Amino acid sequence: MLRRILILGLLCWAAPFAASQSNQSKTILLEAGRLLDVRAGRYLAGQALLIEAGKIKELGPMAEVQAHAPKDATLIDLRGATLLPGLIDAHAHLLAAVGPENQRLLPEVAGMSPARRALLGARLAGEDLEAGFTTVRVVGHSGFDGDAALRDAINQGWVPGPRILASCRKLTPPGGQALALNPAIAQQVLEQEFLEVGSADEARTAVRRNIYYGADFIKVVADADGRFITPEEMKAIVEEARRSKIKVTVHATTTTGIQTAVDARVDSIEHGDEVTDEQLKTMREAGIFLVMTEAFYGGRLRAWLGKSTVLAPEDEQWLENYEKDENQKAPARLQRILRSGVKYAAGSDMWFDYPGRTRGQATAIMFGALSDLGMQPIDVIRATTSSAAELIGWQDRVGAIEPGEFADLIATSGDPLQDITELERVKFVMKNGAVVRNDWHGK
């Protein structure tokens, strides 16, 4: 009975979205005030798009494109707006939402039933899409392969959400990541989130298990509270993943963890807090991406914590020390990354419940944070569009407004090349040729 109620509830909630999906079968003529060519870094004026079967068929001046459009094409007027590709969050956690009062993940999810967590994921996915994130890469904290199930539900039109690449469970050293558990329950909780790796053979088995359960790529935790994946284990993971032609990304914050990942020639490294110039040089030469996760820089962590909790004196002191350290290290690290020529993308690492904001609105705080760190607006946009598309291997599908790509589009009223926080105030969202949201009323 509970299963029937859950399914009926999801179908009723998804009905309006399913109806909007029918727009994919119609030809759409979309007129834009200005369109951002993210590769060239410049605007094109007076442009129009012809959209058929969810993809961009033609792009060009309005008069030319309109001449090729059928008479019954649906017209979308975005004159005066700024049109951009749909946004990509390269480091998302759509099945986790921890509040400021409890900053550890496992106490939250350990008491959550699989059904409740699936509904949480569906809600957060819809909120991400509403904010303009049309593609996300979910990198763990998803329970028993909940991200793969959520991806499939979205693809089948059951619930609204972005395109998802799922990693399923993280591969970690024995003991998982960021845990302090009662030994009596530790193993049961660990198995919800992680696949523990203690040898090269266990590493290969873990990769196979994730692939069996639907992983699009493999996520590895190279360093976890003083515990490390060994070089032999990392190489075994990469070899096994390559055999199935899927990518490997690695959580690595320490120089040791980063070096293990670099030596194994993984596809990308998340965070990279202690990355050295020599490691960046090797990453550039090997084509290894760095995924930056800086959403809480510039006082944003303090703002989040202050939403629903009063910090104890010791916590206030920790926060002051953290902010002082980040203010010194983070901008310099970003400039080293940019100078190195390494390929990079950006992710929110948002696994928090942000009071007063939807998940999509919370995810979007990363744009202002990257700008505060000294990143130019066009580089921020590329890190969450064209470069992120290359990271995931979908550069021929998403990340730019070009013929042949999916019609995943957003529009803002202002100029994000002048004020990157315009991306926090998206007015129009389209995914796969279907209008998700249209708050544009012109000027």
Image: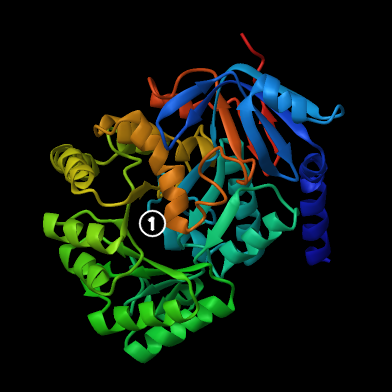
Which type of secondary structure does the marked residue at label 1 adopt? loop
Above or below for 222 versus 319: below
Is residue 68 found left or right of 411 in the rendered image?
right
Q: Quadrant of the N terminus?
A: bottom right
Left or right side of 35 for 185: left
x then y, percent, for residue 270 = 33, 57
Q: Horizontal and vertical percent for residue 14?
A: 77, 47
Identified at 72% across, 51% down, the residue is 159
Question: Which one is in front, 19 or 140?
Answer: 19
**Furthest residue toward top:** 443
Q: Position of residue 252 (x, y in %)?
A: 27, 63
Q: Is residue 243 left or right of residue 201?
A: right
Q: Residue furthest bottom?
A: 201
Figure quadrant of residue 214 = bottom right
Quarter of the view holding residue 433: top right
Residue 428: horizontal and vertical position, in percent?
62, 28
* Quarter of the figure with residue 76: top right
> Which residue does the numbered mark 1 point to in the structure image?
104
Q: Amino acid at mark 1?
A: Arg
Q: In front here: 86 or 44?
A: 44
Q: Residue at x 24, y 80 (%)?
A: 231
